[in-house]
Amino acid sequence: MPRSYTNFIYHIVFSTKDRLPMITADREERLYEYIGGIIRGLGGILLMINGVEDHVHILAKLRPDKAVSDVLRDLKSNASGWMHDVFPDAKDFSWQNGYGGFSVGPTEIERIKRYIANQKIHHGKESFEDEFVELLKVHEIEFDRRYLWT
């Protein structure tokens, strides 16, 4: 076969360092737009982004020649620098090192979009920690709670 045909869609979740509430209402929209621009600049397609004060959910289609870890490294680094430049009062802003990355099939896209769109409602009922543990369980990812947040 002379060409490659791919459809790599990921639900990616990551938090602010120490899960501090740094993504305030006055920063959120512009930060999400900037993150979308980073993803586009890396050849990806942002399908949905949303979150709350301490974490972000992204649904994106990524290029097959870009490792998710490389995309996240570039995204986090650039977004942190941008936050420092645009919001001088956010000089302490940074992202936690790790992330959750979950593959999404084409038939799941609309459901995941709705889930991401409803983050603020969702987190009125459930903590980020509980949500993240549930995502790991649903995607059958092994983890040790002792090391999950350190």
Image (tube, grey):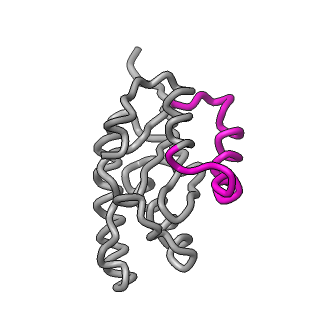
Residue at 67% from the left image edge and 45% from the top image edge: 115
Q: Position of residue 36 (x, y in %)?
A: 48, 59
Q: Is residue 7 rendered to the left or right of residue 93?
A: right
| Nearer to us in this view, 112 or 128 | 128
Q: Nearer the viewer, residue 95 or 34?
A: 95
Q: Residue at x 54, y 80 (%)?
A: 26
- The magenta span reads 103-129
Which x, y percent locates residue 10? 50, 38
Instruction: Name the outermost residue toward the front.
Output: 146
In the rendered view, tell whether residue 17 sits above or below residue 26. Answer: above
In this view, the residue farthest toward the bottom is 88
Task: Please tell me which residue is depicted at 63% across the width and 49% down the height of the picture.
Answer: 126
Position of 22 with respect to 123 (left or right) is: left
Quadrant that contains the N terminus: top left
Quarter of the image for residue 147 reads top left
Residue 76 drawn at (x, y percent): 33, 57
Identify the residue shown where x is 71% and y is 57%.
121
Taking 142 as reference, is 40 above or below it?
below
* Dominant secondary-structure state across the stretch colored magenta: helix
The question of residue 126 being in magenta is answered with: yes
Q: Is residue 44 magenta?
A: no
21 and 119: which one is in front? 21
